[in-house]
Image: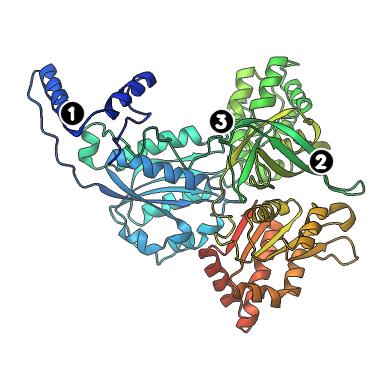
Amino acid sequence: MTATPLLPRNAPFLPEDIELLNKVVARTTPQQRSWLAGFFAGFEAAQSGGLAQPVPASKPRAPLTILYASESGNSEALASKAKKAAQKHGLDAKVFDMADADMALLAKAKNILVFAATWGEGDPPARAVDFYQSLMSDAAPRIDGVKFAVLALGDTAYAQFCATGKAIDQRLEELGGVRTFDRVDLDLDYAKKAAEWTEGALAKLAPEDTAAGGTVVHVDFGGAFPQADDDEPKYTAEHPLEAEISALVNLNGSGSTRETWHAEFAFDDPAFTYQPGDAVGLMPENDPALVDDLLQTVGLGSDAALLLKLQKSYDVTTLSRALVENYGKLTGRADVKALLEGEAYAKFASDRQLIDLFLAYPEKLTQEQLTGLLRPLPGRLYSVASSLKAHPGEAHLLVGAVRWKSHGRVRKGVSSTFLGERRKIGQTARIYVKPNRHFRLPADGHTPIIMIGAGTGVAPYRAFVEERVASGAKGKSWLFFGERNFTNDFLYQLEWQDYLASGDLTRIDVAFSRDQPEKIYVQQRIWERRADINAWLQEGAHIYVCGDEKGMAKDVDAMLVKVIAEPLKGDEEAGRAKLKELTKAGRYQRDIY
């Protein structure tokens, strides 16, 4: 017997009415429901003074190609939401990662919606590079008359804000596309504006009869009370979880030049879930001493309420080009506006923060003027360093404290020193989950894995090994780890040694750069072990890299090309092609920052 469809939570009734109606509908027969349908049709006709109108035949939906370029998953999530929303606009949407797309897809598209993130200094996300380069090349196909709209994501802390999305938007127009909805360029606090833009863009891309004919009501009968987004985490940057800090341990020795905190967060809600490879976001608070300094500088004194507001909710450190531009407009200062000319901004902003601007070009500001210049305080993402199977109700992070001096001032990382200096065990912090489906363990637990990381880049591999142990997976595992000194900087040393002894970690190779006169790095260990790495790849091994893109990750990528090229007669072009094949197959995954 087929279960009777029940009203979803988003039906236009009060929750108590939905519950009552569901109880009634659940007891009805097909004949009774048919009678009710006819009754309500006649009732509506009588109310409107006319006859009941037959339901028009459904019309073919217009095809919509949704493309995304994503590094951290934001664009991917927006694309997924757009696909769900497209149905009510009469659009049959299909979503494609640019990593899996080619120009043939573009040539066949009728309507195009793009969500594109910018990575680093104006570059496309790593997985989207091939598609982006093909799009910008002379070989890109014409798309004359194709309707399109582009949403760009970025970070105003970088000079080339939203450069990838801007370039794609311009290029689609050059190829003959028709821009039906203006591009928006969104900062880290993008969620609400992105939702509004998506709705507007879909309305413009919708078939004319759908757009003119009013709202299309879509009812999901997939279950009695379906979740709005089953693949969305319950806790997000907009709605974080207040979790207790149950452990805070500095893993570095007393003689280290580093300070790396192992932090454990405890929670009771089983809805806070994550997988190894995901990131956990931490919503930090600003250093109150810095906030007070800032308020004093702009003439707002020691306003306790305002200080607390800025401490918890606003970014008071980032010095962006957009902020300088807005400060120049607000104050009318010609010297501030001159910072936007030529290379003046880049020269001034180098290793400076917001307070430096106010000190160099002082003006008295009102509370409204100050907060109007600032963006919301964004969360910081850290690769989760634990497995839920090994630690139910807990999430572990590995956070390196950031401190430096520049232009005569002591600087501190907002999130890392919030945790390392201003939080104690027993206090709470706000956390959320950022899924990363492109950094996952192989589905088959027998598949070998090679894990490469330096410093805090070792965090996800602790989660990987814990998960495999808890799941009973028997696949081989190999860790490459790099840091400065063996004695003071070997993060999770005892755990790795225990895993080696038990056989849960098959191999480990380490590189401590400052333990000998000539510095040795992870990529050198990779080259030394190249024969074994290629042998593991022949067995189907997956390779993972986690770390700094400009440093370790970039060097490791180049070294892996050489390693793979060696049995191919040293042909590095062939090595690069093979590495791209591994990437497309999900066997080469990177979590870089």
Count residues near mark 2 (Cα–Cα under 10 Å), then give few for <14, some for 14-19, many for 20+. some
Furthest toward the right, the residue is: 255
Q: Confirm whether residue 478 shows in the render.
A: yes
**Which secondary structure lies at badge 1?**
helix
| In this view, the mark in front (3 or 2) | 2
Q: Nearer the viewer, residue 135 or 329?
A: 135
Q: Is residue 158 visible?
A: no
Asked if residue 5 is positioned above or below residue 262 in the image, the reply reads above
Residues 167 and 539: in front is 539
User: Residue 433, percent across and down?
Assistant: 59, 40
Q: Quadrant of residue 290?
A: top right
- What amino acid is at disc 3? His
Q: Earlier in the sequence, mark 1 or mark 3?
A: 1
Residue where numbered disc 1 is placed: 32
Q: Furthest residue to the bottom?
A: 569
The residue that mark 2 highlights is 249
At horizontal 79% and vertical 30% (from top left) the residue drawn is 424
Between tags 1 and 2, which lies in front? 1
In the depicted view, which residue is nearer to us: 256 or 450?
450
Q: Which residue is labeled 3 in the image?
A: 239
Q: Are marks 3 and 2 in contact (CB under 8 Å)?
A: no
Q: Residue furthest left?
A: 51
Q: Report whether 8 appears left or right of 339.
A: left
Amino acid type for the residue under numbered disc 1: Gln
Q: Quadrant of residue 314?
A: top right
